[in-house]
Amino acid sequence: MEMLTLSHIAKRFGEKQVLRDVSFSVPEHTVFGFVGQNGAGKTTAMKLILGLLTSDSGEITVNGMRVHYGNTQTNRFVGYLPDVPEFYSYMTPTEYLRFCGEITGMPSKEIKGRCEELLRLVGLEKEDRRIKGFSRGMKQRLGIAQALFGRPKLLICDEPTSALDPAGRKELLDILVNAKEQTTVLFSTHILSDVEHICDEIAFLHDGRIVLQGSLEEVRKIKTTAAAELELERLEDSQTLSSVFPHLKSIGRNTLLLEDAGNLPDILYYLGDKRIPVLRIERQEASLEELFMEVVGK
Ligand SMILES: Nc1ncnc2c1ncn2[C@@H]1O[C@H](COP(=O)(O)OP(=O)(O)OP(=O)(O)O)[C@@H](O)[C@H]1O
């Protein structure tokens, strides 16, 4: 089942048409990467999903229910981590989560168990310092715990990793992957390696439209040219080969890169004809960055 669908969403701010025609859907229990450059309109789309902005056209549903601008009922199913989460910094993480639980009207016995469970999930169970002493990564992790408090069916995170160092990013990405057992995760980012590490599906937003969408496997098939690496046994052979085929690039002592693997048959024929020993021929998977550049025509 689809946990979230956006159909033909358009949104303009004054003269600026931010979203032109955005459609995508997020299947249940997946980690979905919502990718776009700075200013592409990711936060705007998230605010529309949360009913915090009104769209000019189109329809959004969460868990099968239509989102309405204002106090939308669909937010009962949604947890949200904004790009810069705010806390009462004089509280400890336990005090803060307990406070969140009290606001929701959860019985206090249940609150205690839920706080412990969530602090374990985000690796803050032993942390009794006040939030004001927390690193950015710790604040993001606490923000995820807070967003998951009400057992949402959909967790929306706005650029959760963009301000973190590599270790903090890894911790956060691991938490998002673990969270998909209990919820569906939509997270926005412009860091393509994060997407490659954890996403089941992705959508690329560019120029107000989704220009690429699907599982990583599906989107990788879109790249029209694939590269191949060729490792030869002898250095002199690799030098000869690159003089005969000038489009081969040397990327190591005996290793050559062929940017368009479509030219491989000619090279293989030459290698066989000259009886040149080969150690390795490997087709390379396109990186998401290459795919994105190809799709947006850069
Ligand atoms: N309330 C608003 N009024 C006018 N323009 C806005 C408003 N909100 C966003 N914008 C503009 O819409 C565009 C998209 O902004 P948005 O914050 O959605 O992008 P984003 O993809 O989340 O980017 P970033 O990664 O930089 O946060 C930007 O040009 C921004 O200046």
Image (cartoon, helix red, strand yellow):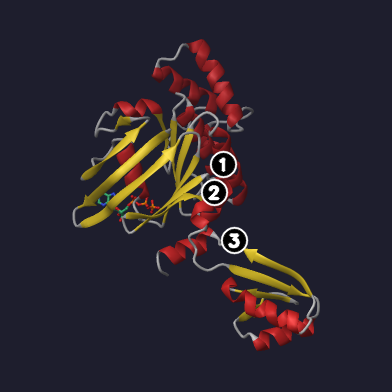
Pointer 2: what residue? 164
Q: Quadrant of residue 53?
A: top left
Q: Are marks 1 and 2 in contact (CB under 8 Å)?
A: yes
Secondary structure state at the residue bearing disc 1: helix
Horizontal side, residue 296 vs residue 233: left or right: left
Horizontal side, residue 226 vs residue 15: left or right: right
Secondary structure state at the residue bearing disc 3: loop
Q: Quadrant of residue 99?
A: top left
In this view, the mark in front (1 or 2):
1
Q: Marks 2 and 3, Cα distance to the nearest angstrom?
A: 27 Å
Ligand 1 contact, mark 3 (Cβ < 8 Å): no
- The three-letter amino acid code for the residue at tag 1 is Leu
Q: Earlier in the sequence, mark 1 or mark 2?
A: 2
* Dot label at residue 285: 3
Q: Are marks 2 and 3 in contact (CB under 8 Å)?
A: no
Point 64% across, 28% down: residue: 126
Pointer 1: what residue? 172
Point 55% across, 26% down: residue: 118
Question: In the image, is residue 29 above or below residue 196?
Answer: above
Horizontal side, residue 72 vs residue 298: left or right: left
In this view, the mark in front (2 or 3):
3
Q: Marks 1 and 3, Cα distance to the nearest angstrom?
A: 26 Å
- The three-letter amino acid code for the residue at tag 3 is Glu
Ligand 1 contact, mark 1 (Cβ < 8 Å): no
Residue 24 position, x and y percent, is 37, 45
Q: Quadrant of the N terminus?
A: top left
Disc 1 crowd, CA 10 A, few/some/many (<14, 14-19, 20+): many
